[in-house]
């Protein structure tokens, strides 16, 4: 019977050790999580500080900083090109004045009326949006059929009084 008592004590002790180790590992993981959160905050501060530095001292920064500023500018240029590629694939373009997304074949912005291409002789007469409940109107200037609540005709650019 003493063999079983010994075995029971050993198993009980081993179980207690396992529970203790699990508690320690859990606490260490929790603390490591806090460290990770603080490092994220530091990284965000570094990012904001870097942005502020570049904006404030772009042209005055020492040459060792200029290398990184040029890399940032190159990346920003690449991002703009990629966005233009996305617009091309989607068949849209952005108004250079107000930034509204328009169909690639539009010649005038339906938001601000900006003329960003020469007016086309044949105005687009098709609907400009998929919303079946959208307001439908005819442009008083060119006769284009327009769907949606817009401030200017996307075909000829005339502004609407509302």
Image: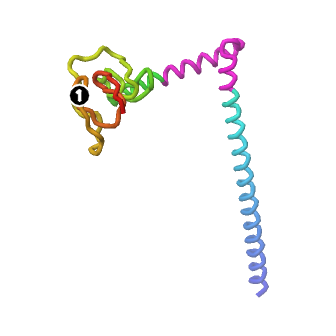
Secondary structure character of the magenta stretch overall:
helix
Q: Horizontal and vertical percent for residue 19?
A: 73, 67
Please tell me in which quadrant of the rendered image residue 139 appears: top left
Q: Horizontal and vertical percent for residue 109?
A: 36, 24
Q: Residue furthest bottom?
A: 1
Quadrant for the C terminus, please. Answer: top left
* Residue at (70, 14) in percent of width and height: 61
| Label 1 Cα neighbours within 10 Å, binned few <14 / some 14-19 / many ≥20 | many
Please tell me in which quadrant of the rendered image residue 29 appears: bottom right
Question: Does the magenta segment cover residue 82?
Answer: no
Question: Which region shows up in magenta?
Answer: 50-79
* Residue at (66, 12) in percent of width and height: 59
Question: Does the magenta segment cover residue 65?
Answer: yes
Q: How is the image coloured?
A: rainbow
Quadrant for the N terminus, please. Answer: bottom right
Please tell me in which quadrant of the rendered image residue 132 appears: top left
Instruction: Read off the residue under disc 1.
Output: 144
Counting the numbered discs, the total is 1
Q: Tell which of 144 and 42 is nearer to you.
A: 144
Q: Tell which of 113 and 34 is nearer to you.
A: 113
Instruction: Judge from the rendering whether residue 50 lies leftward or rightward of residue 98; answer left or right.
Output: right
When the figure is inspected, residue 124 is found, relative to residue 38, above or below; the finding is above
When the figure is inspected, residue 60 is found, relative to residue 153, above or below; the finding is above
* Residue at (49, 25) in percent of width and height: 79
Q: Tell which of 7 and 161 is nearer to you.
A: 161
Q: Horizontal and vertical percent for residue 17?
A: 77, 67
* Residue at (70, 34) in percent of width and height: 45
Q: Residue furthest front?
A: 161
Secondary element under disc 1, as helix, strand or loop, is loop
């Amino acid at each position: 019977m003493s063999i079983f008592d010994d075995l029971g004590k050993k198993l009980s002790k081993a179980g207690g050790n396992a529970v203790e180790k699990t508690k320690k590992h859990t606490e260490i993981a929790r603390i490591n999580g806090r460290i990770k959160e603080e490092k994220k905050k530091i990284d965000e501060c570094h990012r904001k500080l870097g942005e502020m530095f570049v904006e404030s001292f772009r042209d005055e920064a020492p040459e060792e900083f200029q290398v990184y500023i040029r890399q940032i500018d190159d990346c920003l240029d690449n991002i703009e090109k990629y966005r233009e590629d996305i617009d091309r694939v989607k068949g849209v373009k952005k108004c250079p004045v107000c930034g509204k997304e328009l169909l690639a074949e539009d010649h005038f912005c339906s938001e601000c009326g900006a003329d960003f291409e020469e007016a086309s002789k044949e105005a687009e007469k098709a609907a400009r949006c998929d919303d079946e409940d959208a307001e439908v109107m005819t442009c008083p200037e060119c006769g284009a059929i327009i769907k949606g609540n817009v401030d200017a005709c996307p075909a000829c650019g005339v502004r609407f009084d509302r």
